[in-house]
Image (cartoon, grey):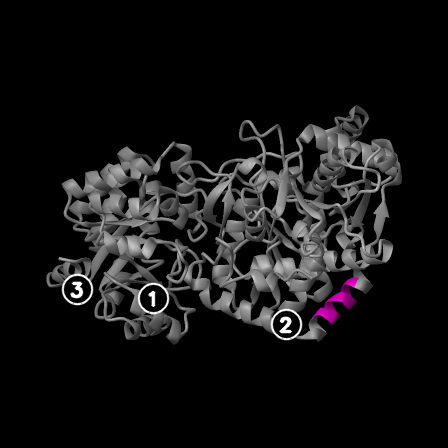
Amino acid sequence: MWDIFAIEKNGYYGRYGGAYIPEILHTTIEELKSAFDQARRDPEFWHAYETLMGSYSCRPTPITHLENISRDLGGAQIYLKREDLNQTGAHKANNVFGQGLLMQRMGKNRVIAETGAGQHGVASATMAARMGFKCTIYMGADDVRRQRPNVFWMQQLGAEVITVEDGTRTLKDAINAAMRDWVGSMDHSHYVLGTACGPHPYPQMVSYFQSIIGKEARKQWETMFPGEQPTAVIACVGGGSNAMGLFQGFLDCDACKIIGAEAGGRGLEGHAHAARLAQHRGTEGIAHGYRTYFLQDEDGQMRDTHSVAAGLDYVGVSPILSYLSDIGRLQSEAPTDVEVIAALKKTIQREGIIPALESSHALAAAYRLAPTLPTSARLLVSLSGRGDKDIFTIADALHDPAWEDFITETAERYKKKR
Amino acid sequence: MNLEQHIRERLKKKPVLVMSHLICGYPSLDDNRQMLQIMHDAGVDLVEFQFPFSEPSADGPVFTRANQKALDAGTRVADCFELMAWASSKFSFMPVMMGYTNTVIQYGEDAFCQKIAACGGRALIIPDHPPEEDTQLLAAAKAHGLCVIMLMTPTNTDERLHTLGTKASGFVYGVARRGVTGAKTAFDTGVATCIDRYRHATSLPLAIGFGISSSDDVAFLKGRAEIAVVGTAFLTAWETSGPDAAKQLLAALT
């Protein structure tokens, strides 16, 4: 398999990565690097991880053939790697439980996590509940407002949810707030970063845990289609953790294209999108502890982004994906909100699968590509999360009047009760 | 005279120098000019000019908010340079640039350092730039006669402190406690032990910051460190009680 440890040099992937951290975290990051290196060299560790994910999170997740949609489109056959079937409904669980096992080895007992859409927050709170850790989740005030159901579940799971009022009140501000907590609490607390970004070793460590997706998928693919490579593997790219997870299983397949789907938002002409790699919209910068492509202005201030999918509107992107993009291995697409909602509807109606809005970006890219290919071609798409948990967001995106009536009536009932 | 010599010269007249701080563009550039006049009148020795950044992850809540407000008001990097140049032409304190790595690399390490030197700046404090990361910052600063200030922190091992000591020039910024800027620090034996450890790692003048807010705090540093850093306390006084209160605070500390 393609080796993420072989391409890294001093925490860099080509020009990208590094550890741009305040000096106060130097020792903590050194300890984390060494704990992670020891763990990954211990075969028992990966075995314990697989066993845990097998008994608690439905792994290995299956591969599903989208027979109806493939037939409708009349081109390539489309297959989904079903990360939506994980505990908590998304690939986020893989990373979080891996880091939880690492915390046990390091003897830490408090989880700090940032969350944007809330999926990583829910996964972290779930892990903390299961493993008996204390848990503090930082979430931008705008995200708290948009993702109330996830806040509800985090709190039910025993986590303290801290609303971040700084900056643009979204994911990037939650990351900064989590870092601030960590510089004061590192003795007992571990920062469970949710994606393959941030200072070294996070991009590598998160990718390592997520590689369970690609490892499984490669094995399943070889059983299903002996000796044949997928024509392309496709995943949505926010920070890039589910993409890194799936891609690692196929980066050594020379004939297989590697395609990332970023948030095209309202189109790439203005700034209402989160395409950093597609059409080279991002520029090189350093923030949140690492060097990568960011959406920023000439002074290096991060821009506001937009996506219908709250989990894809991050200003940076995994340094490993920036490297893969630079060397021409990764191709990036940016389907718009409109295309994504159409893909979501199609998947629900024709296949009975409710994808997350984030994952629907990968589906939109696949539905664009499939008709251009022969029926003998095969695409493997990461269905990173399920959508039914995002009912408020998806209902908003679909503008369903009956749903809006229901919410209004429920609100009125609550008002009366008060 | 290099920065260290300047500091040593000033230390002949008083036991502890004061380094104050402002965030360019907050509350406004006009306010900044008034702040600088007050700092000058109070006899402040060094002033940190913080260039606002949208991701100020090493700053506490007061400065984080101020960074954002400065940017919301439209503060550009060019405004920060201008303010520093204005202050250098008018006052005798030593200006120091403080900010984040991205601000420097977007401008270009060499061009940025050249500009800071031209504006009368003497040093750079970049809290998210560890000395081993491979930007051209250290080389560019050296080429333009600027010092890159190393931060020493309570969590560093003695070995790490030694490494930082060998890379330092001008002065060393010793962090008095864990956490971000702006919270209260109890200046006690714990801090004294920290300062001793930093002292062992460097022969340069030692600035101590994070949580200095009273004349007792400055008095505590006498005989232990050379520079007291007053950051959040000044801004909080300005915000809550106005320029006169900020003036009184500095007068009590210098």
Residue drawn 74% across and 31% down?
A: A341
Question: Regarding mark 1 in the picture, which secondary structure is present there?
Answer: loop
Q: Where residue B40 sits in the image (x, y, percent)? A: 17, 46
Residue under label 3: B15
Q: Residue at x 28, y 48 (%)?
A: B113
> Could you tell me how far apart the alpha carbons at marks 3 and 2 are, in whole angstroms?
51 Å
Q: Which residue is mark 2?
A: A39
Residue that numbered label 1 is attached to: B187
Residue B26, image x and y in percent?
A: 34, 38
Mark 3 and mark 1: Cα distance apart in space: 18 Å
| Label 1: how many Cα within 10 Å (few below 14, some 14–19, many 20+) | some
Majority secondary structure of magenta residues:
helix
Callout 1: chain: B
Count numbered badges in the picture: 3
Residue closest to the eye, A150 or B236: A150
Q: Amino acid at mark 3?
A: Pro
Query: Which chain is home to disc 2?
Result: A
Region in magenta: A46-53
Say which amino acid is labelled 2. Answer: Ala
Residue found 21% across the figure and 70% down from its top: B223
Q: Residues within 10 Å of mark 2 (few under 14, many from 20)?
A: some
Mark 3: which secondary structure?
loop
Which is in the foreground here, disc 3 or disc 2?
Answer: 2
Marks 3 and 2 belong to one chain: no
Residue A119 at x, y percent in the picture: 69, 48
Relative to B85, does residue B19 appear above or below in the rendering? below
The C terminus of chain B - image quarter: bottom left
